[in-house]
Image (spheres, helix red, strand yellow):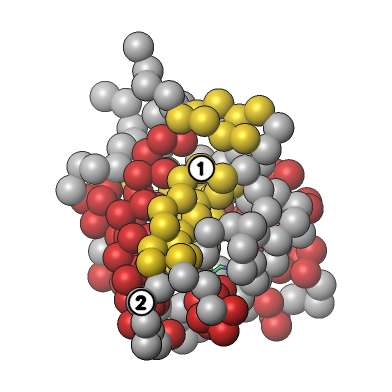
Amino acid sequence: MRRAPLLGVLCSGRGTNLQALLNAARAGRLPARVAVVLSDRAGAYALTRARRAGVAAHVVDPKAFATRAQFERALMRRLQAHRVRLVCLAGFMRVLSPVFVRRYRGRLLNIHPALLPAFPGAHAVRDALAWGAKVTGVTVHFVDEQVDHGPILLQEAVAVRPGETEASLLARLHRVEHRLYPKAVRLVLEGRLRVRGRVARAYRKA
Ligand code: GAR
């Protein structure tokens, strides 16, 4: 029997997207298994979610390393030890260096709560509201050497309602994220993507 491809998920916070990936894998909607969850923050609830699901969970604390390169080598060692094929950033609030990105090129995904290239960065929801955007959304993309920049896999728009708060908009964005991320991971794992330059296209396998 072929073993399911293994995912590594990097988180810094609540881990609701991690939960969506765990749920999709358990329900058979994702032909993969989450093998390891890594967090740069000891208090990240994502670690609890992982352990509850019986998945290995480790804190890799950047403060324990003299340089970013050493910190990233520790991340890569953990991913290699768990034979991870695809790495999903799920609310991992750190910029990875070109060395890390090149090591996992084409196998490193991120989810972002805006329609990139609009509102990149750590405060995308707040920024969209402050800008007065009438539409924002969710992007799943390959990670490249620039922040929130790589080829876009999937996007979905979400309308901003009058009187919207950051919390209410985030809640609706999350619902979209939890559907879109497993779908994007599935496309990659099924080899149903062609990437030319920065344009990724999904196609049906014959
Ligand atoms: C998600 O909304 C994700 O899109 C965002 O962090 C949140 C993590 O939530 N990522 C970024 O802003 C990356 N620039 P979660 O921990 O509940 O999955």
Q: Which labelled disc corresponds to residue 153?
A: 1
Q: Nearer the viewer, mark 2 or mark 1?
A: 2
113 is higher (above) or lower (below) than 197? below
Please tell me in which quadrant of the rendered image residue 198 appears.
top right
First in sequence: mark 2 vs mark 1: 1
| Kind of residue at badge 2 | Arg
Q: Is residue 17 left or right of residue 128?
A: left
110 is higher (above) or lower (below) than 31? below
Using the numbered discs, state the Cα–Cα distance from disc 2 to disc 1 in whole angstroms. Answer: 26 Å
Q: Position of residue 122 (x, y in %)?
A: 61, 76
Please tell me which residue lies in front, 39 or 120. 120
Q: Which labelled disc corresponds to residue 103?
A: none
Whether residue 161 is visible here, answered yes or no, is yes
| Kind of residue at badge 1 | Leu
Q: Secondary structure at mark 1?
A: strand
Which residue is rendered at x = 24% and y = 57% of the image? 23
Q: Position of residue 3 (x, y in %)?
A: 33, 32
Q: Is residue 82 left or right of residue 69?
A: left
Q: Is residue 9 left or right of residue 159?
A: right
Which residue is rendered at x = 68% and y = 77% of the image? 62
User: Pointer 2: what residue?
Assistant: 161
Please tell me which residue lies in front, 200 or 85. 200
Q: Position of residue 197 (x, y in %)?
A: 71, 32
Instruction: Tell me, yes or no, whether the two marked residues, 2 and 1, touch with CB atoms within 8 Å.
Output: no
